[in-house]
Amino acid sequence: MNFRSLSLFSAAVSLAVVVALAQETLSQSAQPTPTAPGAPPGLTLLSRDGRRPLPIVMVSDQEFIGLDDLAAAFQLAIHEESGAITVSYKGKTIILTPEQTLASVAGRLISLPAPPTRSGRRWLVPVEFIARALAPIYDVRLELRKPAHLVIVGDLRVPRLTVKYEPAGAAARLTIDAMPRATGTVSQDGDRLTVKFDADALDVPGQLLPAQPAQSIVQAVRVTDATTVTVDLGPRFAGFKAASQPVDPVMRLVIDFVAQPTETTPTQPPAAQPPPAPPELPPAFAPPSSPIRTITIDPGHGGDDAGAKGANGTKEKDVALSVGHRVKAVIEARLGVRVLLTRDDDRSVPLDERTAIANNNKADLFISLHANASMRRSTTGASIICASFDAPSETAGAAHAGERLPTFGGGLRDIELVPWDLAQTRHLDQSVAFATILAESFKGHIPLGAHPVDRAPMRILEPANMPAVLVEMGFLTNADQEKLLAGDAFQNTLVQAVYDSVVRFRDVLAAGGTR
Amino acid sequence: MTAQRIVVFVAMVLAAFVIGFASYAVPRWRGGPSTHAVAAARPTPPPQPGRKIKARLFYINDDGTRLTTLEREVPYAETAVDQAREIVAAQIFPVAEPLVSAIPPGTTLRALFLTDRGDAFVDLSKDIVDAHPGGSINELLTIYTIVNALTANMPAIHSVQVLVNGKEVETIAGHVDVRRPLEKNLALVQ
């Protein structure tokens, strides 16, 4: 009886192994996606050396993997003695016991979802063995992503991509979330866009986007190499605009598309830039001729960092976020300018990341919103602060601008090299001009401090590669100002003054001023 | 004869010491007269026996947006690094009204280093972060109180970097970049 059931079991396992091996052979170079219905997809081992398949065996709906395969892939030594299986790696051991779900990993007990199973001369272990038993003793990071059938070896950046497509009449939006965060760079190549991710590989679901109708602006989204996603465009495509923004914990790439106005001109080549915006299009399609098309608003502090606090409990982070939301709403609605917030809720964002959002989205203006504090309770008034650099930095910035460097094709080319932390040096004149406009707009509406326009080595402004200011709206340490800052009336007045200043600054830039 | 020689030798040594001190210490520690010295309520650090030098220290002015200077005596030290420590210790010492210090209460000096290039690294306790009330103007005045106290009183010190608990930090309250040594900023002094 026992012998018979063992034989049946062995036969079933052998059959599963044969099926798995056949499937694995057929899909040697395939992505880690299901290849045949009913057959288990193999695991894909991702490391600096490339991809390598690891076959899976299904036993009682449980995914198993051969210890011999693991031994070959991870340089393990397998030893079987007196009923125990010892797996060794560089002096560390895992001890498995048949029919036991508990295993000892370097002296510590872990549990597996199923016990080790013998298949002919091989031992099979559940795939969770990789994460629970092998990873703790292995000398580089091992990460098992079971749904994607991926095993990541070492510190590779393998973001998982999620794609959402929202067609809306003459426009459409494609959103690609990458988690953990990885930035995608979009470029157009004829009738397709390529999105190259700053990563080592991509973790993608079986199908990024369901099939689209023939009239859709986006026809398909597919992975074309280890780190590239290709967006196939339909004949209605006329232009696009892409922007990346971190949305905790993912990096969100939003590509906005516009369609050609009629469907009778499919042979017209796609325009590199979006055409002038019809009024119903979203703000991302502001007139391309405007010197200000994108503004980054940075509500200061957030999360654990409350910033300055008033005696009545008003927090700088809350005032900054509230004003930030209002500025975004007003400027987007009235000017048709895209406004990006460095944070749109109560969370902590590193200073470099805030400026990076502005730089990566090629913002034309950066405004950081803050509320001040003083050791003297009588101190009041708003001020606008521009960056300052100690003398050697200013000259270093100038020296780096416009170097002539050799190019691949021979000859020399002017290359602008500006160190990250000195990017603001080139925009200081414009920053001071905008700060002065802000101070003038505040006059008579917002109480100004003793030094309405100030200079300081502000961490957040130094890397900004565009005109950039930090607005201190008032002093939370002053009782009257705390009440003001927390109130709708003051915040709306301040937003109106910021809006007026942006319009004036835009007009000055359009007229060729400040340079 | 021998006793006379000893007297002459001692007199020469004393004269050399006096001349040496006059040529080294006096120009080195001589600060200009304070234009905004606060007359009342001078801080009272623990009494230190021995020689003193005059140093310009920095406190928050009446409108809370700039620094004002106060000239006061600080113990003399033989080496530049010890003298720098004395100045910072005097600067971060708590003061009473009407003086207001931009240094958060409880901040202590953990260590101070000087480089040959004239950079000073001032390692302060984490109280400078934890007890800081925030605000960019406050933070600016806190940082430049330390930077100016050293650069204005010690010509050998060209720039100052503030460290917190022995480590380099980005900012102490989220605004002012302190990842590198900062130079004297007298534009912030009233």
Image (cartoon, rainbow, N blue to C red):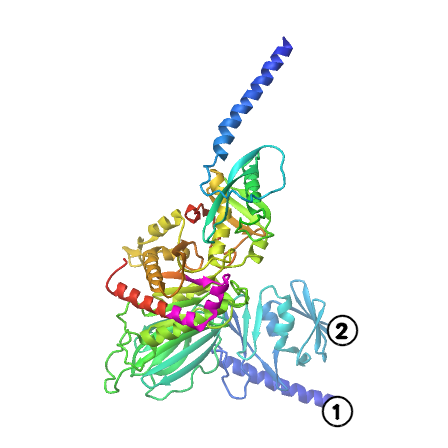
Residue A486 highlighted magenta (yes or no): yes
Which numbered dot is residue A82? 2
Callout 2: residue from which chain? A
Separation (CA) of disc 2 from disc 1: 25 Å
Quarter of the view holding residue B126: bottom right
Q: Position of residue A52 (x, y in %)?
A: 52, 73
Left or right of A458? Residue A77 is right
Q: Secondary structure at mark 2?
A: loop
Residue at the bottom extreme? A1
Q: Position of residue A109 (x, y in %)?
A: 71, 72
The secondary structure that dominates the magenta segment is: helix
Q: Position of residue B114 (x, y in %)?
A: 52, 41
Placement of the N terminus of chain B among the 4 image quadrants: top right
The magenta-colored residue range is: A471-495
Residue where numbered disc 1 is placed: A1
Q: Amino acid at mark 1?
A: Met
Report crowding for label 1: few under 14, some 14 to 19, many 20 or more residues within 10 A (C-alpha).
few
Q: In the rendered image, is residue B179 in sight?
A: no
Callout 1: residue from which chain? A
Name which residue lies at 56% across and 18% down.
Answer: B12
Residue A36 highlighted magenta (yes or no): no
A36 w.r.t. B16: above or below: below
Using the rendered image, report if marks 2 and 1 lie on a common chain. Answer: yes
A265 w.r.t. A355: above or below: below
Could you say which is closer to the camera, residue B112 or residue B43?
A: B43
